[in-house]
Image (spheres, rainbow, N blue to C red):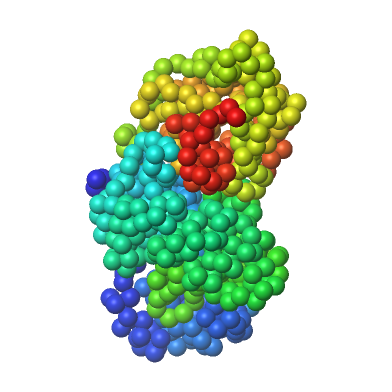
Amino acid sequence: MPARTKHAFPRPKPWTEVATHLVDVAMGRKPADLVVRNGRWVNVHSGEVIAATDIAIAAGRFAYCGPDARHAIGEGTKVVDAGGRYLVPGLCDGHMHVESGMVTVTEFCRAVIPHGTTSMFVDPHEIANVLGLDGVRLMHDEALAMPVNVHVEVPSCVPSAAGLENAGAQLTADDVAEAMNWENIIGLGEVMNFPGVAANDPLMVAEIAATVKAGRTVGGHYASRDLGLPFHGYVAGGPEDDHEGTSVEDAVARVRQGMKAMLRLGSAWYDVASQIKAVTEKGLDPRNFILCTDDSHSGTLVHDGHMDRVVRHAIAQGLKPVTAIQMATLNTAQHFRLEREIGSIAPGRLADFLIVSDLAALAIDEVFARGVRLAKGGRLEVDIPPYDYPARAKRTVKLGRMLKAADFDIVAPEGANEARVRVIGVIENQAPTRALEADLAVADGLVEMDRENDVCQIALVERHRGTGGVVNGFVSGFGYTRDCALASTVAHDSHHMIVVGTNKRDMALAANRLGEVGGGVVLFSQGREIALVEMPIAGLMSDERAEIVAQKAAKLTAAMREMGCTLNNAYMQHSLLALVVIPELRISDIGIVDVTRFEKVDLFL
């Protein structure tokens, strides 16, 4: 495992080491480091907004929250006048994947801190599928060096569905048990093998048991519409939350079973509006709901926001501002057993807070973490040094050979003039797909695409072991109208290479280009490279600044639109087409997979 990284930002001391000092500051016997005066205290414990409040901070923690903190002001105390603005706890993202931002933990933090995110709970199962436990440790150590709280979960399913795909690495129950002893591990990442949990799969049982024994939280992922016995078996198996719900019925079912319903608004997942009705219309207790993002790419982070975007959206659905903020602060902290550390403005907690001028609009003026101002007016005020990923984390794209257009030929059944095939159907703004069927023409023994009816080709190219393997199929929903191909080494969760195209020559060119640059996403059209985002770290993350990555991603999005694609955040939809744990139909390195039955099926019907 890599050696411990020297931290650019000191870790906060445990409360036990500074408690007596906090008492002295609260009593006026010692001066505070920082006092913020005349604020409106958004108290997520009581659900109130308390006017004319002062807060005193020492050793990176809140020492006093009350009507007058003048007794804590000394010669060296910095004093900030809030001017009647709101004091809001720093926002928490209860479930997310850094790799989906196309950037490292460092760059992700640089992008989201100005938006008020001061705590993140990250599941690095993307890098784990490429680099195994070593990749998890690399991200774990990078997270420790951040000026905000980046807690790491141990990935539970690497590969996500054994037998249905072959990833670049594998994690065992012993790996999970070992990682539970690391300093910054907060729990077990989303348990995606929901049939395995319901069937008492020994690996799932062992991983969940190791997590519970360590006193950590077990993350859930129940991506089935079946709320019958398989769901009940899954809940009995130990997962404590779930972010895969898409309907109000999903949210209600999870909360009634003692789970936390995580409602996500990512770059391409819009699941808050439908599920929040469980609170706004059905009156369920909002304490059991958590807001999260799951997957946000760099363009969303830089231009639209992060958890602030989710909170604003929840408020727009009819939630009271304080309730929405509770779902992004205290509820999250309590779920991960960190209520005494984060999630509220209260004595003893880390001094993570925002100064907000408009609560309903969540207009964030200033962002503080551990008592230090990190951002003002939407701009980062501190330098966060880049994390140096070692050479073994790069050049992970191994194609084994140069691909040709013929590698994407789909041979029809012998003697057929037409072929009935399975087609992966993309659903806009949702992770699930539809299992569609289409009758396609056959010419010279090869099945043709049907661009007029939006049926183009999809291929999965093996990229971990250099086998040269290519699995071909069909996909619908992208709307491409021109000759083009989009290739990506971000291909949840096994992260081979997905190529979607209307032209086989462009498909080969795009795949080979990613082999040259070490991974990323590229768009070719009529033999020319139109847009490229290089991601050399595990083929998943860029080593450039978030702003630069966002610019390249924006160029990619614009180029996809020029090709006829009108989907919201189509790249995110593209990257999930190999996710063999979310229904209905997917592609993997073993073939076409029916996720409703968890089995490989033939392309031809």
Most foreground residue, 180 or 348: 180
Q: Position of residue 73 (x, y in %)?
A: 44, 82
Q: Quadrant of the C terminus?
A: top right
Residue found 48% across the figure and 36% down from its top: 600
Toward which corner of the image does residue 447 lie, by quadrant?
top right
Give the percent coordinates (x, y) of residue 82. Answer: 59, 75
User: Does residue 88 appear in the picture of this structure?
Assistant: no
Residue 133 in view in this figure: yes
Rendered residue at 31%/62% (across/down): 209
Please indicate whether residue 454 sits to the left or right of residue 21 in the image: right
For this rendering, which residue is in front, 377 or 144? 144
Instruction: List x then y, in percent, for residue 39.
Output: 59, 79
Tell me what residue is drawn at x 25 percent, y 54 percent: 178
Name the residue at the front extreme.
415
Query: In the image, is residue 32 above or below residue 9?
Result: below
Q: Residue at x 67, y 74 (%)?
A: 282
Residue 448, position in %: x, y?
65, 19
Q: Is residue 551 above or below residue 373?
A: above
**Foreground: 10 or 208?**
208
